[in-house]
Amino acid sequence: MSVGKSVKRVDAYEKVTGRARYTDDFLDYNPLIAKVLHSTIANGKVLSMDISEAVKIPGVVKIVTCFDVPDIRFPTAGHPWSTDPKHQDVADRKLLNTRVRLYGDDIAAVIAEDEVAAAQALRKIKVEYEEYEPILDVFRAMEPDAPLLHEEFPNNILAHSGYEEGDFEEAIKEEGLLKFEGWYETPIVQHCHIEPVISYAYMEKGRITVVASTQIPHIVRRITAQALGLPWGKVRIIKPYIGGGFGNKQDALYEPLNAYLTTQVGGRCVKLEISREETFVSTRVRHSIKFHITSYVRKDGRFVARYLKSYANQGAYTSHGHAIAAKGGAAFKQLYSAEGAVKADLYSVFTNTPAAGAMRAYGIPQITFAMESHSDDIARALNMDPIEFRRINMMKKGFYDPFSQNENYYDSLNAVIAKGKEYFKWDEKVKAYANQTGPVRKGVGMSIFWYNTAVWPTSLEASTCRMVLNQDGSIQMQMPETEIGQGADTVFSQMAAHTLGIPFENVHIVSTQDTDITPFGTGAYASRQTYIGGMVIKKTAEILKEKILSYARSINRIASADLDIEDGNIINKYSGKVLMSVGELATEALYSMQAAEHITAESTYQCKTNALSMGCCFAEVEVDIPLGKVSVLDIINVHDCGMLINPKLAEAQVHGGVSMSLGFGLSEQLIFDPKTGRPLNNNFLDYKLLTALDHPDIQTDFVEFYEPTSAYGTKALGEPPTVPPAPAIRNAVLNATGVAINEAPLNPHKCFAKFKEAGLI
Amino acid sequence: MEKVLIRFTLNGKKVTSAIDPRWSLADLLRGGEHKHTGTKKSCEVGECGACTVIINDETYNSCIYLAIWADGKSIRTIEGLTGENGELSDIQQAFVDEGAIQCGFCTPGFIMSSLPILESGREYTRDEIRKLLSGNLCRCTGYKNIIDAVEKTMKARLEKKQQL
């Protein structure tokens, strides 16, 4: 029984010896090298391009410009394809674009024999532009006289959606209500996976193969074929180990262009590696969102009416688009209830900044920063304990969402809060930090969150698993769901071993996905791997087990219902007697002169549920007021992610997610020159990713409530840890100083100004 | 460009390499004839530490160290840590045991950066270890398990040394 145990990662040896092969580690011969020419204006049009000097550089093989590529617009979002045209992603970019929409748009590509020649050629290409005003702000973008980024979207609004449940105007008429409102804002941040965006492509038998660092091989195959106007079967995607993705690689990035480039040089192998500086700007980022929240509250702290307006900066292209803002809208009405009405207006707006796509937790870190800051502002004004305020209003056991048909089966939020509160000695600290004076003060803050697992019913949720029995009783398992560092391969192996009744070591998972071989599934996103993957593994393992037992019956003349598999042996369920090992059975089956059979199983599972994952964060900070510096002294995330398949890996997921959110709350932001839209800090020196020195050891705890809709009792954990730390820190700073800072990150530039404004400096 | 011949020691073995003088040491190790692809390239400007190797007992970002400067030097890479029969060194085993690996891309760089700490014979505080590892970026782990792995290995080595 390996489920629930902290077995070691199946890929640990390869990774710790440096033998694990990532995309760039496969090239045993010298490929051609491609580099992309990016625009040096943020908004405008390429009028002409002169490549005459560039082609003269020795080693240059081919240059393609935005005037050469197929006239096909394609969508890039890593969503499952929808056969309903109304639900298909927006197709708004070409392989290279003449209409320039961000500083760093892709306008040409050079293929050369080596990197130096490619880089030299880029510098020799002369571009003539027509320039328009760079639009960096969502409110400027929506003004009637702002130039349109995409002609089909008036006022640069990609989408506007909303809801009103209950009658808002009626609800606020109640006498004695207190009104609270505030603006909250989150920055543009980037995923910063340590492996750059990279792929290489070549042709074989008239088909294109792209080896790519992606989270979603089957989806990238579809998008690449769409972008090139090819039948989808003409494209093959191979995904080896990848050095992190965090949602950036849940998008077709440069794979379509790379595929196109190999077709331009007779199918020769072309490598396209995107530098760190390019990755920051020309791949995807997290949506920066401005929120306005209005709440009407009774004196006892109960919400009566709530209204959210949100303006998401979509950047230059649609990518995952409005799905991020929409998910935030769902969190807004589900995390807290209001007795009268809840209302939302959600906008996603194009600007001349990097295209915003999926990033770990998909809009929920942004809305949670706003919502949980707002909660503390109200609690403070009412002189209530912030936890008490939340308890009155937060999602209760038994909550049911008619749209997703999700049910909250447990009192998860109270359970996680109780653990966090106890670890933190909350009441004592709140008391100790009241009435501080002086330049250095301490404070505590907390935040809760909501997250739904996987994407049903908005999109397809299905996966396929293949299991092949070997002669020795071990299996190969192939999954379309991808290992991207989170440990999916390990927990999948644990699940298969558990259901089959074979030792963990006897599950050989195929880590690489190859769309020519790997069964269909959509990949790593939406914290769906253990939930959806678990369902299809259980189903397939049960089929395989039934086949093994059925074969055992034919040898042993015992009804298969009386047999079971335990620790790799076929046993009599009642006597416990070992009849034979699975290996002996498999060898017999494969080589039998009477009834030869290769025992395999493959099945697809379509999931039509979507579990609610919840948790909280408690943070303690020290604020040096004159320096505007916030230091985190202690931090804990407590999660209800259902049952833990591998506690050590689960903890590790939380560590990484909290660290990412600490960056989001304290230091990370991409900034742009307001006049030109030029990125100013697109490198690791100026973009402040936290180092080992910048935060304390992250504490974790779990509440294990068995999720009834899940094959192994699990629900989302991949993304949720990234949600609550930033608002918990913001609230701890409020607790320490009395100053509400509503704009992340809380870096010294912002804190200093706010402390000064508040008269603390 | 015409190749230049250099001689250096790679993981204890004397080697000769024909290099393009424009190559970085990371290019030489990963490409060239060695194919030591355990050394990773990420930022290629010395900001992230993924390409960390040891040159004459000091850690360097091999992406901004010219290959030609390696002439006459002793270079150690992640490949040199694993034994002849595939045995893991103590620090590699600690990374496995402590769950210090996720995507694995920063792992070789972190392990190489930890070697001077472990080989100094000195006991560092946890905060000193943090500082010494702050030149390496990791986006997956939140660093805790990495620091645990280094600290435990350091303590185990010091204890062993005391027993001798």
Image (cartoon, rainbow, N blue to C red):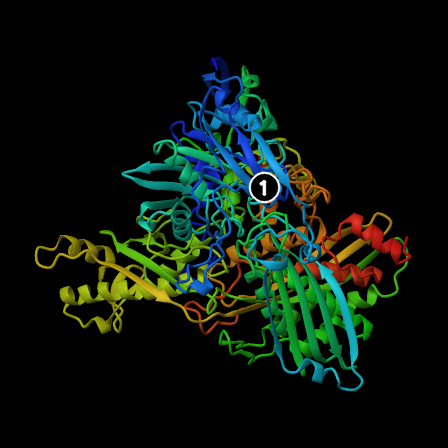
Three-letter amino acid code at the position of disc 1: Lys
Which residue is at a point 30% across and 37% down the rendered structure image? A204
Q: Is residue A422 visible?
A: no
- A506 or A739: nearer the eye? A739
**Quick check: A279 left or right of A500?**
right
Q: Is residue B82 visible?
A: yes
Q: Which residue is mark 1?
A: A45
- Does B89 sit above or below residue A731? above
Residue B123 locus on image (x, y percent): 67, 37
Q: How many C-alpha atoms fall within 10 Å of the one at disc 1: few (<14), some, or many (≥20)?
A: some
Q: Residue furthest bottom?
A: A175
Which picture quadrant has residue A342?
Answer: bottom right
**Quick check: A706 left or right of A680?**
left
- A524 or A631: nearer the eye? A524
Which residue is at a point 40% across and 32% down the rendered structure image? A27
- Does A336 sit above or below residue B63? below
**Quick check: A471 left or right of A421?**
left
**Which of the chains bears the disc numbered 1?**
A
Residue A498 locus on image (x, y percent): 37, 62
Instruction: Tell me the quadrant of the picture where the N terminus of chain A can be found.
Output: bottom left
Residue A50 locus on image (x, y percent): 54, 28
- B84 or B73: nearer the eye? B73
Q: Residue furthest left?
A: A594
Q: Secondary structure at mark 1?
A: strand
- Does A99 sit above or below residue A183? above
